Image: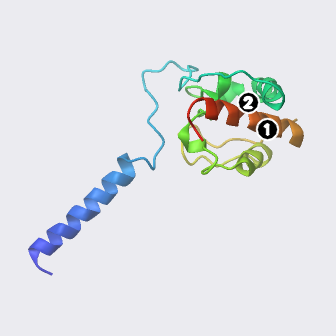
Amino acid sequence: MNKRMLMGVLLIIVAVAGWYVLGDRRAERVDRAAQPGAALVEVTVPDLAGPEALGAVAFAAKCAECHGENAAGKDGSGPPLVHKIYEPNHHADAGFFNAVRNGARAHHWPFGDMKPVEGLTDAEIATIIAYVRKLQAANGIF
């Protein structure tokens, strides 16, 4: 292999590594200047009715402690669910059910593993998911 070809291969490897580390495959960096407990994203809250309204109440009771008010995340506690990482094509509703029931291994954010959430029925989880999906849609996440 000549020097020019070797340099080209090395350049490609460096470019791919840079894309992987700095690119869209990683969660957006959390602002280190944020105060502990502060929301991590701004969330527009739409009008809620039916299951979404019930989900908002259940979310506030069981999820907001870590995921923040209106799923905006909470610095030092948990990620925002109103984020492109959690769009339906990447994290389906079944993934949310699984995370609530069984917990979730940390893989997008530096908050650590999520523990299972006790005391929610499948119907309540469904309303929470409806609420989160309504928030996502109102904030341009489909």
Quarter-of-image position of residue 78:
top right
Q: Residue at x 34, y 52 (%)?
A: 19
Q: Position of residue 75 (x, y in %)?
A: 55, 26
Q: Position of residue 50 (x, y in %)?
A: 84, 28
Q: Residue at x 66, y 30 (%)?
A: 135
Tell me the amino acid under the disc marked 1. Val
Quarter-of-image position of residue 55:
top right
Q: Position of residue 106 (x, y in %)?
A: 60, 46
Q: Which residue is mark 1?
A: 117
Q: Nearer the viewer, residue 43 or 48?
A: 48
Can you say whether 60 is above or below 92 in the image?
above
The C terminus: image quadrant: top right
70 left or right of 35 in image: right
Q: Residues within 10 Å of mark 1 (few under 14, many from 20)?
A: some
Badge 1 marks a residue whose secondary structure is loop
What number is the disc on residue 142? none
68 left or right of 98 in image: left
Could you tell which of marks 1 and 2 lies nearer the N-terminus?
2
Q: Residue at x 56, y 28 (%)?
A: 76
Q: Residue at x 71, y 21 (%)?
A: 47
Outermost residue, left direction?
A: 3
Q: Which residue is mark 2?
A: 63
Q: Residues within 10 Å of mark 2 (few under 14, many from 20)?
A: some
Can you say whether 2 is above or below 118 in the image?
below
68 left or right of 140 in image: right
The N terminus: image quadrant: bottom left
Report if the CB atoms under discs 1 and 2 are less than 8 Å apart. yes
How much space separates mark 1 and mark 2, taking CA atoms?
8 Å
Asked whether residue 62 appears in the rendered view, the answer is: yes
Tell me the amino acid under the disc marked 2. Cys
